Image (cartoon, rainbow, N blue to C red):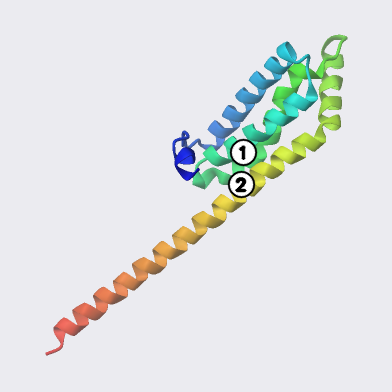
Amino acid sequence: MVLALRRLPNPRLTGIGAGLFASAVMLLVGCLDWLLFDASPLVYGLLFLPVSAATALWVRGPDLVTAPISVPIAFAVGVVPIAGGEGGIGGHTMAVITALAVHAGWLYGGTLVAGVITTVRKVRLMGRRQRAAAQAQAQAEARARATTAQRRP
């Protein structure tokens, strides 16, 4: 299982890159959902969850905070094709707002997935940094003791 996971791509996206990735993929998902599944909100919501996870996994360490922020924006971008609406820009805008309100459960779920993944990644990153700093300090103290021992007759 671990070997299979290591074969997956491991891109590191910047904060804006993660937002653009999620938005582009969700727009593509929304268009394909509209074409193939007659704008099914269930299909759109189910596909939103892995996109949220991939965005949270592929964002760089320093930009981790951007994943839970960009994922809801991507949901809103992708819901435009499946929202429907008639009567010009006003009708489409109302349809998008209604779709966002009605499908808020999927939105919250994907945001929660991204938030949990980025939180776990951040905690692990902080632990690695603490261990590296402690190890560097221990090595520096050992070198200092060694040089002090060499100076004594």
Residue denoted by label 1: 53
Residue at 61% x, 24% y is 25
Outermost residue on the left side: it is 153
Under mark 2, the amino acid is: Ile
Q: Secondary structure at mark 1?
A: helix
Residue denoted by label 2: 117
Say whether residue 96 is left or right of residue 121: right
Quote the CA–CA distance across marks 2 and 1.
7 Å
Would you place residue 127 above or below residue 138 in this image? above
Residue at 61% x, 23% y is 24
Query: How would you rate the neighbour count of disc 1 (Cα within 10 Å): few for under 14, some for 14-19, many for 20 or more?
Result: many
Under mark 1, the amino acid is: Ala
Say whether residue 28 is left or right of residue 124: right
Say whether residue 61 is left or right of residue 82: left
Do labels 2 and 1 touch, CB within 8 Å? yes
Would you place residue 57 above or below residue 120 in this image? above
Q: Position of residue 153 (x, y in %)?
A: 11, 90
Q: Secondary structure at mark 2?
A: helix
